[in-house]
């Protein structure tokens, strides 16, 4: 009991999930004195996430709000190189995204574009003398120029016949590079005008190539040719080289068919640098422009751990794989100032810490050892780090630290306290738990105890399963609609988040253990973890429920047809039939890997290569075994696990007399974006468990939900709290 005069802390409730301020983009000023950052909140009564810009001094002592525009967003914020201006785009005037400039020392933002079709993207030149932006209707967009301070008229730089897709400044600022298709989409525009809206699946697309536009005279020079679709260009600091990814223009091309090319901007044809069947990413030249780095699958084999590859820039040289012998993913974050190291944030179980990858030796060294989750951005000086930190009881906030002092958290400067009101709540105690599966494999996960936990009692247990499956639950504060463990804990539930085999962050053998035989090992890990918590006296064996989304929904559906130990299940975006999903989904590679056993270009890994196996792995195959009341949830426009999977499962359960409900979220993709829909998801899930576990009369009280939305709208304040320290 609280002492006399103290106010008892209330547990987190559903409405609290919509109160959180979320940290967006953040960037250190060129002089290192200030950090500009975005804050996003749900704004009422329009129920939309809205972003504003804030400024904090590098010592964390001064915090200032820069923008305040209800009903609008401030996006793509950037510092002017070498100057004291901040630029951003906003729809605050007239509904179209326009470019605004703002002095960080105060004053109103100044609108510097009036583009009829709004600004699609923008960037300052490296010296800040000019800024460029992309505008125009789809298929006809062009690059326009302004002075770097936004003064004077905007002038068109490109007049490309087929429109510009993306652009990049030359290192010297004397040219702009851009990509554009070879053929105009005028026929498609004419079709739309004629209301001939019949869609051709995988309609052929024109090649996309790289061009250069000179700032003096605007002359355009073609740099690439052939049947390629160029994307993701990056330029060396010395201005000599451009590296890019390109896909064949085949209408049925798989994203894994991308390759990396290098082009000498002094002349010559692009040099192809890769020949594999994986998706390369994170192309980045070293500061001295002598090395090119990228991230790709180990040994260029799809489905393995991530590795960083480097090679000398020029005609000679081969890729060298860094991180060999390190049994965790290795990624690219930023080069060190001297080019000798690559910094990145790497996972090790439920933790994510900053790592340094030595370019010469390829070895990995941990720079931090936090029992939480870090992310990292390195300032242009190569010596300062912007960090985000969170753990299971601490929402994400921003910190500043010298790279040389990362291992000493006492040297970090805390810059934000976005959600101080969280200290008034009674949060769940959490811990990392480990147990042995039946075959002796060590498995890890997170346990949240009920608020007010009494070790003499047993509690209902919510088993939450993550997506991916090459993902993991982390020791991070979960303040979203996805799993919300603190809300469950406030209602007397224990929450268990197992990182079953197939999860990332535990090594390649652990991660690829389920390829070709998707269910058995992971299910053993999950169920043995539940048994461990029952054996420890935490969980009541007759009060188990399960929930998951995406791959978590897959395992929820498999659990539905393989055991009756759970009292209720909530399955989101989960598979029912692997065979039909293969054609419905927008990604075949993961299905070929997990069901077919490998993802090679010519592998026998398709459903027609082994119908019996794909059907035997489908929950629908065993649906007559289902007994558990199951809530099914899908986004109407989910391309990853489309709605027909939910319809197949729901119809089968209905016909078999198994209690079931299906919620379809209008217009939503694989993850829910609209706050109203997120609220419904949480309320429905809680109600489903309360109904089947604790006898609540109704599982979804629509009248109560309407009253909740009205209360949220009435109680919405200014949103000032929690922006700074």
Image (tube, grey):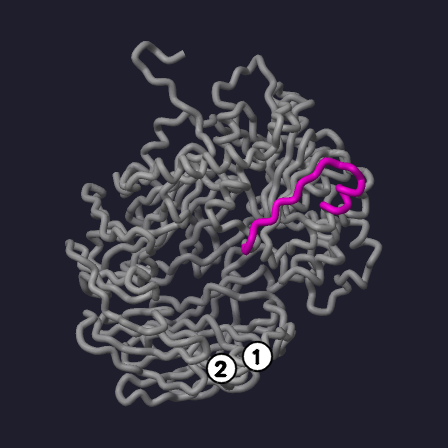
**Nearer to us in this view, 615 or 688:** 688
Q: Residues within 10 Å of mark 1 (few under 14, many from 20)?
A: some
Region in magenta = 650-667
Residue 620 included in the magenta stretch of the image:
no
Residue 328 percent across, percent down from the top left: 54, 49
* Whether residue 400 is situated above or below residue 445 in the rendered picture: below
Residue visible at 30% across and 12% down in the picture: 5
Give the position of the C terminus as an image quadrant. top left
Give the position of the N terminus as an image quadrant. top left
* Whether residue 661 is situated above or below residue 240 in the rendered picture: above
Residue 306 percent across, percent down from the top left: 55, 57
Q: Which mark is residue 205?
A: 1
Residue visible at 60% across and 67% down in the picture: 256
Q: Quick check: 679 left or right of 568?
A: left
Residue 413 in sight: no
Residue visible at 78% across and 47% down in the picture: 620
Q: Residues within 10 Å of mark 2 (few under 14, many from 20)?
A: many
Which residue of the protein is positioned furthest toward the right in this rendering?
612
Q: Which mark is residue 181?
A: 2
């Amino acid at each position: 009991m609280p002492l006399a005069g103290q106010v008892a802390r209330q547990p987190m409730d559903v409405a609290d999930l919509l109160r959180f301020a979320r940290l967006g983009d953040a960037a250190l000023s060129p002089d290192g004195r200030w950090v500009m950052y975005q804050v996003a909140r749900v704004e009422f009564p329009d129920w939309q996430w809205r972003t504003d810009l804030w400024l904090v001094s590098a010592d964390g002592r001064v915090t200032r709000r820069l923008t305040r525009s209800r009903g609008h967003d401030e996006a793509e914020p950037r510092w002017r190189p070498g100057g004291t201006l901040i630029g951003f785009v906003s729809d605050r005037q007239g509904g179209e995204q326009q470019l605004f400039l703002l002095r960080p020392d105060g004053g109103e933002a100044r609108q510097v574009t009036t583009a009829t079709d709004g600004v699609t993207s923008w960037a300052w030149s490296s010296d800040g003398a000019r800024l460029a932006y992309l505008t125009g209707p789809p298929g006809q967009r062009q690059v326009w120029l302004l002075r770097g301070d936004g003064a004077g008229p905007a002038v068109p730089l490109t007049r490309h016949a087929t429109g510009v897709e993306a652009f990049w400044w030359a290192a010297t600022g004397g040219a702009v590079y851009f990509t554009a298709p070879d053929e105009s989409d005028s026929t498609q525009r004419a079709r739309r005008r004629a209301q001939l809206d019949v869609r051709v699946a995988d309609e052929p697309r024109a090649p996309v190539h790289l061009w250069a536009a000179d700032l003096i005279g605007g002359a355009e020079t073609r740099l690439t040719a052939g049947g390629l679709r160029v994307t993701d260009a990056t330029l060396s600091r010395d201005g000599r080289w451009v590296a890019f990814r390109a896909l064949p223009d085949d209408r049925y091309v798989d994203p894994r068919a991308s390759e990396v090319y290098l082009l000498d901007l002094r002349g010559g044809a692009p040099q192809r640098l890769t020949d594999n069947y994986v998706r390369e990413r994170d192309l980045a030249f070293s500061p001295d422009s002598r090395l090119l780095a990228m991230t790709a699958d180990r040994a260029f084999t799809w489905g393995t751990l991530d590795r960083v590859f480097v090679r000398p820039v020029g005609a000679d040289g081969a890729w060298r794989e860094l991180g060999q012998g390190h049994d965790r993913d290795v990624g690219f974050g930023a080069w060190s100032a001297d080019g000798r190291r690559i910094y990145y944030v790497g996972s090790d179980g439920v933790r994510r810490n900053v790592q340094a990858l030595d370019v010469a030796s390829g070895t990995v060294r941990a720079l931090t050892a936090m029992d939480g989750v870090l992310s990292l951005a390195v300032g242009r000086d190569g010596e300062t780090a912007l960090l985000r930190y969170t753990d299971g009881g601490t929402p994400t906030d921003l910190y500043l630290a010298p790279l040389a002092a990362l291992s000493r958290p006492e040297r970090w400067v805390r810059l934000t306290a976005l959600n101080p009101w969280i200290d008034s709540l009674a949060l769940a105690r959490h811990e990392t738990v480990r147990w042995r599966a039946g075959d002796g494999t060590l498995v890890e996960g997170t346990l949240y105890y009920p608020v007010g936990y009494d070790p003499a009692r047993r509690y209902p247990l919510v088993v939450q399963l993550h997506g991916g499956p090459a993902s993991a639950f982390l020791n991070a504060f979960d303040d979203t609609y996805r799993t919300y463990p603190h809300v469950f804990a406030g209602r007397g539930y224990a929450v268990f988040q197992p990182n079953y085999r197939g999860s990332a962050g535990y090594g390649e053998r652990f991660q690829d253990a389920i390829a070709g035989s998707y269910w058995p090992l992971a299910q053993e890990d999950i169920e043995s973890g539940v048994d461990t918590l029952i054996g420890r006296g935490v969980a009541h064996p007759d009060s188990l429920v399960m929930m998951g989304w995406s791959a978590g929904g897959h395992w929820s559906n498999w659990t539905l047809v393989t055991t009756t130990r759970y009292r209720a299940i909530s399955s989101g975006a989960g598979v029912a039939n692997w065979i039909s999903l293969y054609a419905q989904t927008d990604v075949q590679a993961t299905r070929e890997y997990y069901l077919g056993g490998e993802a090679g270009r010519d592998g026998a890994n398709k459903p027609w290569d082994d119908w019996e196996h794909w059907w035997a792995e489908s929950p629908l195959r065993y649906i007559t075994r289902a007994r558990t009341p199951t809530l099914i949830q899908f986004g109407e426009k989910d391309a990853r696990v489309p709605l027909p999977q939910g319809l197949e499962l729901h119809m089968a359960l209905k016909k078999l007399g198994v209690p079931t409900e299906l919620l379809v979220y209008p217009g939503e993709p694989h993850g829910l974006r609209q706050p109203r829909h997120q609220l419904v998801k949480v309320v429905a899930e809680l109600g489903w468990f309360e109904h089947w576990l604790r006898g609540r009369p109704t599982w979804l009280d629509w009248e109560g939900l309407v009253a909740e939305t009205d209360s949220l709208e009435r109680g919405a304040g200014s949103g000032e709290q929690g922006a700074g320290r």
